[in-house]
Image: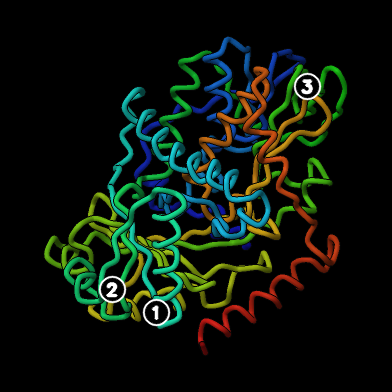
């Protein structure tokens, strides 16, 4: 993805709470657990481990929350990046149920941390998946039935007329509404967890990219200005891990995704778009997702790139997509436009595990990372502390490398995704 968007000032960065810059790693240091990555996975693991009494140091290549955790759509959704039916095939229904319950626990964990650590992050309850095609209505109704029957999870089906009471768009044929899911300001939540980690004793070291990892009974991590040795390591870079562990790199693909923010809208216009503050996402393969910010901007996301290259004429494309949903915004442009990477796996299931006896990792959230990254950190912390039952279950999910090797895997994936986009358009 082009540097102008990956480094662009996002709406979140412009409205972030103050965060004091942390020093880089310098010289030789020692700790019990070294965490690589200052997003929600790494911060969650670091906080949980510090609360258990471990000496934890967290290494972040740039600033805390610089990656996906601080620039995402901010949607907090129960479930995983693949359907429960896929997890049932991989693990069986009973263990698939465990994973679903843990995704619900992940949402509860966000609420507990918000309250315990007084994190101001504009939480709003409510999320609706919306269908554009008749086949998608059937798909969503099937999801609803399966969740109620096999997972004891209740959602509401809204007719098109009911949906239009809350959403000022006639594009959709109904909606599957989930009151437990919702949305928040992702960077302010991430920074809130970082403050909690600092208060718990975690040493956070920014501007400390790790360029070499030497395994062993004591793992060595090399940074530009220092070396950190630790008994355990947590790799929490997700799509930004940068080839530090080649075997993991082959099983995860960075996908560019983009978000735009309008200027603040007047109250009547904002309420005419979404009058109950819910988040919205369609279920196309190349989906649109959107919500209102606390200051009444429309935050509109989508237009994924599977080639790591910023799509041409991105602003115009994003504007047309927004206007297709909300024609009443035909005269409105964007004040902010930014992008970032999320990490996907071949089967869209989460990839958590360990390398050897003392290097742990969690990544591949496939679009659901804002919620489940917190539970990922907790599961890894449990395993390091000697309770590995939950991590053992995640490790039973088999993950294959993306085909094509280092140079062809992105072009092959982009070709495959073009087919799914065509299917969305024609069927």
Residue 396 at what x, y percent from top left? Answer: 72, 43
> Looking at the image, do the residues carrying marks 1 and 3 touch, with CB atoms under 8 Å apart?
no
Tell whether 360 sits left or right of 38. right
Q: Is residue 224 above or below residue 271?
A: above
Could you tell me which quadrant the N terminus lies in? Answer: bottom right
Question: Which residue is label 3 attached to?
Answer: 227
Residue 331 seen anywhere in this rendered image of the structure: no
Choose top left, top right, bottom left or bottom right for residue 160.
Answer: bottom left
Residue at 16% in and 63% down: 271
Of helix, strand and loop, which one carries label 3?
strand
Label 1, label 3: how far apart the Cα atoms are: 53 Å
- Labels 2 and 3: the sequence-earlier one: 3
Along the line of sight, the residue nearer the viewer: 394 or 68: 394
Residue at 42% in and 82% down: 133
Residue at 76% in and 30% down: 224
Q: Nearer the viewer, mark 2 or mark 1?
A: 1
Q: Is residue 120 above or below residue 289?
A: above
> Looking at the image, do the residues carrying marks 2 and 3 touch, with CB atoms under 8 Å apart?
no
Choose top left, top right, bottom left or bottom right for residue 296.
Answer: bottom left
Q: Which mark is residue 132?
A: 1
How packed mark 3 is, by other alpha carbons closer than 10 Å (few <14, some 14-19, many 20 or more), is: some
Residue 173 seen anywhere in this rendered image of the structure: yes
- Labels 1 and 3: the sequence-earlier one: 1
Q: Which mark is residue 332?
A: 2
Along the line of sight, the residue nearer the viewer: 71 or 394: 394
Residue at 75% in and 25% down: 225
Of helix, strand and loop, which one carries label 2?
loop
Residue 285 at what x, y percent from top left? Answer: 54, 72
């Amino acid at each position: 993805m082009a540097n102008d968007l990956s480094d662009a000032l996002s709406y979140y960065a412009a409205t972030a709470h103050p965060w004091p810059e942390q020093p880089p790693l310098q010289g030789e240091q020692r700790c019990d657990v070294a965490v690589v990555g200052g997003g929600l996975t790494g911060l969650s693991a670091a906080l949980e481990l510090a609360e258990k009494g471990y000496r934890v140091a967290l290494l972040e290549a740039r600033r805390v929350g610089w990656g996906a955790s601080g620039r995402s759509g901010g949607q907090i959704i129960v479930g995983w990046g693949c359907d429960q039916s896929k997890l049932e095939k991989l693990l069986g229904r009973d263990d698939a149920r465990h994973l679903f319950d843990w995704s619900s626990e992940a949402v509860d964990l966000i609420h507990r941390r918000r309250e315990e650590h007084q994190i101001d992050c504009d939480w709003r309850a409510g999320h609706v998946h919306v269908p554009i095609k008749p086949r998608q209505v059937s798909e969503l109704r099937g999801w609803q039935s399966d969740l109620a029957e096999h997972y004891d999870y209740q959602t509401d089906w809204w007719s098109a007329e009911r949906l239009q009471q809350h959403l000022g768009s006639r594009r959709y044929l109904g909606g599957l509404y989930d009151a437990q899911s919702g949305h928040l300001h992702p960077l302010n939540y991430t920074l809130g967890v970082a403050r909690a980690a600092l208060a718990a004793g975690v040493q956070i070291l920014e501007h400390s990219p790790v360029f070499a990892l030497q395994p062993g009974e004591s793992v060595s991590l090399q940074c530009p200005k220092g070396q950190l040795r630790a008994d355990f390591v947590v790799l929490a870079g997700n799509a930004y891990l940068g080839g530090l562990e080649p075997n993991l790199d082959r099983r995860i693909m960075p996908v560019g995704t983009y978000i735009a923010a309008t200027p603040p809208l007047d109250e009547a216009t904002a309420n005419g778009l979404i009058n109950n503050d819910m988040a919205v996402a369609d279920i196309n393969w190349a989906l649109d997702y959107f919500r209102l910010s606390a200051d009444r901007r429309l935050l509109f996301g989508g237009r994924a790139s599977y080639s790591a290259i910023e799509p041409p004429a991105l602003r115009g494309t994003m504007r047309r997509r927004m206007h297709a949903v909300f024609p009443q915004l035909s005269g409105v442009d964007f004040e902010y436009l930014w992008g970032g990477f999320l990490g996907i796996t071949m089967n869209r299931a989460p990839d958590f595990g360990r390398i050897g006896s003392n290097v742990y990792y969690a990544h591949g959230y496939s679009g659901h990372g804002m919620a489940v990254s917190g539970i990922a950190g907790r599961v890894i912390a449990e395993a390091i502390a000697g309770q590995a039952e939950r991590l053992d279950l995640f490790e039973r999910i088999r993950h294959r490398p993306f085909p094509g090797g280092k140079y062809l895997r992105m072009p092959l994936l982009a070709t495959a995704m073009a087919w799914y986009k065509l299917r969305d358009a024609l069927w």
